[in-house]
Amino acid sequence: MESGRNTKQKQLILSILKDAELPMSINEIYAKVVDQLPKIAKSTIYRNIDALLSQNLIDKYHLNDNEVFYRIKSDRNEHKHFVICDDCKKVFDLPSCPIHEIESTMEEEGFLIKKHQIQISGICKECIGKSKNKY
Amino acid sequence: MESGRNTKQKQLILSILKDAELPMSINEIYAKVVDQLPKIAKSTIYRNIDALLSQNLIDKYHLNDNEVFYRIKSDRNEHKHFVICDDCKKVFDLPSCPIHEIESTMEEEGFLIKKHQIQISGICKECIGKSKNKY
DNA sequence: ATCCGTGCAAATCCTTTGCACCACG
DNA sequence: CGTGGTGCAAAGGATTTGCACGGAT
């Protein structure tokens, strides 16, 4: 179980991600971390995120047309996808994963799927409510 | 039908995209364009791609962990998704789109889907063949 | 005491922007 | 002709890297 040294920076980043139910961007993580460690460098965030990724403790997501987000993996390694609102940028859970059926088809054709991601965006209920005829 | 001036740069970019069946990156487009217009600036590519996007003539894709690709829209506006090989980076068609079922569920919950994208990556048949036990 | 991880600054990479000039219509 | 598009160079934003120092083991 290779995991490097246990610095307070890494502990803090990990605990912030554990507390977040939804994916966070580097800037969101940084903003939270700075509250408790004002001198931390953003490069430290990047380096620790990389470490956590290769330790398979977090997942990387691309939402909002290319923005990168990170989210802790749960104990039971739950499989999740997300949806973002183009207007308020809030992130929501996708109820289910529609990829698995496709996977078997592709693997019959010899393509070995390693990972997949779904990006859905649109307007959430709340934003639709706020502006009656914009959409 | 707003479409701006018809410069040779824009014509060339569009014709290159028309010839390509699969999504192309900015660099791939640039490499092809430079052959015929050696003095073209990469910023011209970016600006024309933006124009083509807002004219709805091309689609934007994110493949290979965040790389951006563009592809011409067909006459009948076909709906397509792609898959990339992590090893050789070749891009393949996804046989079908598994999102539509999800859409109705989400819209019942009040979320209006504007667009969606799927990213699947893994190892293609050919690359699996080349290295017996790497994967 | 060792040496890995950090903070800081500079370097990179990709994309966007400002501006003078050129060419499409 | 007029003005919108171009090439060039510089600016921007996100991420990575080099390096000396300090803290974790």
Image (cartoon, coloured by chain):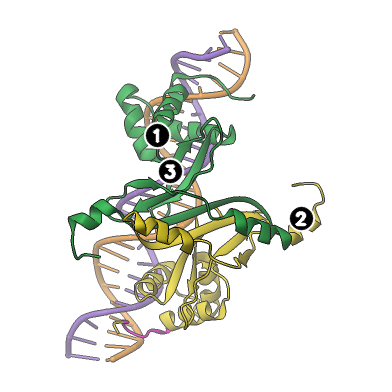
Chain colours: A yellow, B green, C purple, D orange
> Which chain does the numbered disc 3 sit on?
B
Mark 2: secondary structure: helix
Q: Alpha-carbon distance for marks 1 and 3?
A: 15 Å
Confirm whether circles 1 and 3 share one chain: yes
Would you identify the image quadrant in which residue A52 lies?
bottom left
The answer to which of A11 and B73 lies nearer the viewer is B73
Circle 2: residue type: Ile
Instruction: Give left or right: position of A130 versus B74.
Output: right
Residue at image location 64% in from the left, 56% down from the top:
B103
Residue at image position (19%, 65%) is B133
Classify 10 Å Cα crowding around label 2: few (below 14), some (14-19), many (20 and above). some
Q: Secondary structure at mark 1?
A: helix
Q: Which residue is mark 2?
A: A128
The image's mark for residue B42 is 1
Image location of residue B25, percent across then percent down: 39, 41
Q: Is residue A48 visible?
A: yes
What number of labels is visible? 3
| Residue B69 circle label | 3
Magenta segment = A3-8
